[in-house]
Image: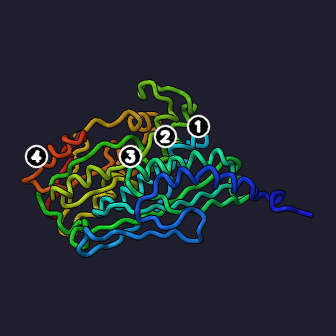
């Protein structure tokens, strides 16, 4: 006789995981949530009374090989935050407010302690961004992952008024690029970063450039949410578009909101490059072009603002504790 447990799937561990995460998930619930955890589907009743023509905005993403750093550090409470904040930013730059989030967690062997840490990260970021964690899938799939490894993905849904969608159509020649700082690599460029850094350092080494941080700590810095500064500028009508700097770096993402008849220029000397990027480039002899196309280089969000209101936009951001930097401009394509 062969049992499911002997085949590699532990139903008891799954039930224990659900027991642990239920209170964490419930803490994220907003008034629109209609069903508790465990239903076959997640129900959400949106309140669209503040919208004239509401449009739903969705996005799906993963954490990528940053997870490999979490495995080596045996720290799992940050990657859930990374995933939620990345998804929030992707719809926030479209002008949307997040409504709810769903996660997918798959692993070769389910450890309730690890799952609880991950979901705690989901819940923390969902609460900070005002969105509900309304559902998810936990899959134990033996033989598919190395021992102790897992993968994460998330889906987010938000809402924006149709007339207030930000997709680049409002961008004009002369607009100024205002950058907001990242906390580190966020969730992109980890395949290159790991290859370079772990060829020269152990995960708990403290290179002088990192100011006391270990390599692992610097790489696990949480991908920040930009929802607050984005909405702050939107409410004051101070932005024509936003750019979430992810895979492809500043050039590969900014071009996504620039109309075809326009182009843009970036002054990469306009802000100090954070030490983690300097370290990667130095020890890996990484070409500058690769650095620019792979990493955010210290700028995680770009607000494209009207030239005649750039001072006002800078002040608005500084009023909420941000440190914007004028990093470029939009011009006609020659």
Give me the C-alpha separation between circle 4 and circle 1.
Answer: 43 Å
Name the residue tied to disc 4. Answer: 311
Q: Which of the marked residues, 4 or 1, is nearer the chain's N terminus?
A: 1
* Mark 3 closeness class: few <14, some 14–19, many ≥20 residues within 10 Å: many
Q: Quadrant of residue 108?
A: bottom right
Number of labels in the image equals 4
- Above-or-below relation of 270 to 19: above
Name the residue tied to disc 2. Answer: 220
- Above-or-below relation of 210 to 249: above
Judged from the image, the secondary structure of the residue bearing numbered disc 1 is helix
Q: Which of the marked residues, 1 or 3, is nearer the chain's N terminus?
A: 1
Q: Measuring from the top left, give residue 215's x and y in whole percent.
A: 50, 33
Q: Which of the marked residues, 2 or 1, is nearer the chain's N terminus?
A: 1
Name the residue tied to disc 1. Answer: 73
* Mark 2 closeness class: few <14, some 14–19, many ≥20 residues within 10 Å: many
Identify which residue, 193 or 22, lies in the foreground: 22
* Mark 4 closeness class: few <14, some 14–19, many ≥20 residues within 10 Å: few
Name the residue tied to disc 3. Answer: 224
Mark 2 touching mark 1, by CB under 8 A? yes
Q: Measuring from the top left, give residue 319's x and y in whole percent.
A: 19, 41
Give me the C-alpha separation between circle 2 and circle 3.
Answer: 12 Å
* Mark 1 closeness class: few <14, some 14–19, many ≥20 residues within 10 Å: some
Q: Quadrant of residue 247?
A: bottom left
């Amino acid at each position: 006789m062969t049992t499911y447990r002997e085949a590699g799937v532990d139903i008891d561990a799954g039930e224990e995981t659900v027991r642990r995460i239920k209170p964490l998930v419930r803490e994220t619930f907003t008034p629109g949530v209609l069903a508790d955890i465990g239903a076959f589907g997640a129900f959400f009743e949106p309140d669209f009374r503040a919208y004239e023509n509401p449009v739903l905005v969705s996005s799906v993403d993963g954490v990528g090989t940053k997870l490999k750093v979490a495995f080596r550090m045996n720290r799992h409470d940050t990657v859930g935050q990374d995933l939620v904040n990345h998804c929030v930013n992707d719809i926030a730059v479209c002008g949307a407010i997040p409504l709810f989030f769903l996660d997918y967690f798959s692993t070769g062997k389910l450890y309730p302690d690890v799952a609880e840490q991950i979901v705690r990260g989901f819940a923390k970021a969902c609460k900070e961004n005002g969105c509900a964690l309304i559902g998810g899938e936990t899959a134990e799939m033996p033989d598919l992952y190395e021992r102790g490894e897992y993968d994460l993905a998330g889906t987010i849904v938000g809402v924006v008024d149709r007339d207030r969608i930000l997709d680049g159509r409002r961008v004009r020649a002369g607009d100024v690029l205002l950058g907001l700082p990242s906390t580190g690599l966020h969730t992109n460029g980890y395949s290159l970063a790991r290859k370079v850094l772990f060829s020269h350092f152990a995960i708990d080494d403290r290179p002088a450039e990192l100011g006391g941080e270990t390599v692992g700590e610097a790489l696990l810095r949480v991908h920040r949410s930009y929802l607050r500064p984005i909405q702050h500028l939107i409410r004051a009508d101070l932005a024509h578009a936003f750019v979430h700097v992810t895979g492809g770096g500043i050039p590969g993402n900014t071009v996504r909101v620039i109309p075809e008849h326009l182009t843009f220029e970036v002054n990469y000397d306009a802000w100090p490059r954070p030490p983690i990027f300097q370290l990667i480039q130095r020890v890996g002899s990484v070409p500058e072009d690769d650095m620019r196309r792979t990493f955010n280089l210290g700028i995680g969000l770009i607000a494209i603002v009207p030239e005649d209101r750039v001072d006002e936009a800078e002040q608005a951001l500084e009023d909420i504790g941000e440190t914007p930097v004028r990093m470029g401009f939009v011009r006609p394509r020659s």
